[in-house]
Image (spheres, rainbow, N blue to C red):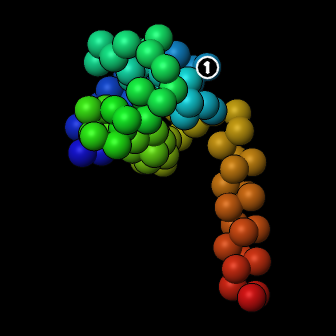
Amino acid sequence: MIREKIEWVKDKLTHHPELRDSNERLYYHYLLAIGFDVNISFKDALKAMESRTIPYLDSIGRASRKVQEMHPHLQGEDYKKRKKKEEEVKEEIKSI
């Protein structure tokens, strides 16, 4: 499922650097690309996710992280900050 999205995400991150630090904006572009009506109610959008008519936001987020890991030149400005925070959280969890 994510493999199918990796090339699409790579293309978007290459041509739209402003999407590199926003999975939400990237997901919005994905919904537009698949022809999903983004003007429906939030409740209906959640129902579409529940019924798997559209994928969950996290699938695009996972694909984005994988692409940025494989292609460092596509990492956004906040990438290093997120990685540092991730390491801090891992250390905190280990200490519990």
Q: Which residue occupies the foreground of this view, 73 or 37? A: 37
Q: Position of residue 89 (x, y in %)?
A: 72, 69
> Residue 75 appears in which quarter of the rendering?
top right
The residue located at (48%, 30%) in the rendering is 43
Q: Which residue occupies the foreground of this view, 54 or 66? A: 54
> Residue 85 appears in which quarter of the rendering?
bottom right
Placement of 94 over or under 74, stated as above or below: below
Image quadrant containing the C terminus: bottom right
43 relative position to 51: left or right: right
- Tell me the kind of residue under disc 1: Glu
Q: At numbered mark 1, what does the secondary structure look like: helix, strand or loop? A: helix
The residue located at (38%, 21%) in the rendering is 31
Where does label 1 land, which residue? 18
Q: Which residue occupies the foreground of this view, 71 or 86? A: 86
66 relative position to 92: left or right: left
Q: Is residue 57 visible?
A: yes
> Residue 51 appears in which quarter of the rendering?
top left
Label 1 crowding class (10 Å Cα cut-off): few <14, some 14-19, many 20+? some
Q: Is residue 13 visible?
A: no
Total label count? 1
The residue located at (45%, 45%) in the rendering is 58
Q: Which residue occupies the foreground of this view, 82 or 1? A: 1
The residue located at (24%, 45%) in the rendering is 1
35 relative position to 84: left or right: left
51 relative position to 43: left or right: left
Q: Position of residue 21 (x, y in %)?
A: 63, 32
Q: Position of residue 18 (x, y in %)?
A: 61, 19
